[in-house]
Amino acid sequence: PVQLFGIEVNPYAHELAQITVWIGYLQWRFENGFGELADPVLRPLRNIRRMDAILAYDADGSPTEPEWPAADVIIGNPPFLGDKKMRYELGDRYVDDLRKLYGHRIPGQSDLVCYWFEKASVSVETQRSRRVGLLATNSIRGGANQTVLNRIKTHGSIFMAWSDRDWILDGAAVRVSMIGFDDGAEKHVTLNGQSVSSINSDL
């Protein structure tokens, strides 16, 4: 379990994530003949951090980027929240601070999910991670959102993508894109399950 790092801002989900990892590990041990652990079976996992993944504040109250742990692979299902709903859901101060902090990299009209793509992209670019797999609404393929995929392509490669798929969220059907990217090391490239020579930022 200590090989798995995580970031979760919600207190309940943070606790649930730790328990889920332990249950999965215990099931794996049982299925592979490793026997039972000594008590206590469940222990705190300090590698799953309770924090905001894209915005923090320093001692002076100024917005700053939180540091993500180094990891071989980053996977995630960041929140689906369009540009128009961000202020209503997150508040003016949060949105203003977020856009000020990332303003030179992400256009102000971008959806919330773009900030996760940017953070993961920087992690690959600085060699703190090798590859990334993230989920987004299919709007990431165009408009201001596409800027983050353009940036990924400048220093790496999108090696896997499903450009437009059905997804059920809170009972409502949305269209999503699933995207895998790295520094260009992966040479097997697939788009919508088919081998291709490359994937553009519009997927």
Image (spheres, rainbow, N blue to C red):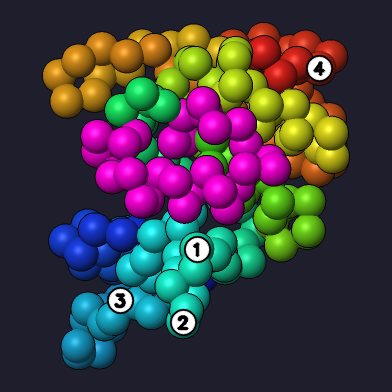
Q: Residue at x 26, y 63 (%)?
A: 14
The image's mark for residue 72 is none
Residue range highlighted in magenta: 86-113
- The disc at residue 198 is 4
Quarter location, residue 158: top right
Looking at the rendered image, the disc whose residue lies closer to the viewer, 4 or 2, is 2
| Residues at marks 3 and 2, CA–CA distance in whole angstroms | 47 Å
Q: Is residue 101 magenta?
A: yes
Q: Looking at the image, which residue is at 78% across and 59% down?
A: 127
Helix, strand, or loop for circle 3? loop
Asked whether the beta carbons under mark 1 and mark 3 sit within 8 Å of each other, the answer is no
Point out the tag, 4 or 1, that comes first from the N-terminus: 1
Q: In the figure, residue 72 lies in which quadrant?
A: bottom right
Q: Label 2: which residue?
A: 59
**Is the C-beta separation of discs 3 and 2 under 8 Å?**
no
The single residue placed furthest to the bottom in the displayed view is 39
Circle 3 is placed at which residue position? 35
Element type at marker 2? loop
Could you tell me the amino acid type at mark 1? Pro
Kindly report the distance in space between the C-alpha atoms of the residues bearing marks 4 and 2.
45 Å
Q: Is residue 135 at all visible to an observer of this figure? A: no
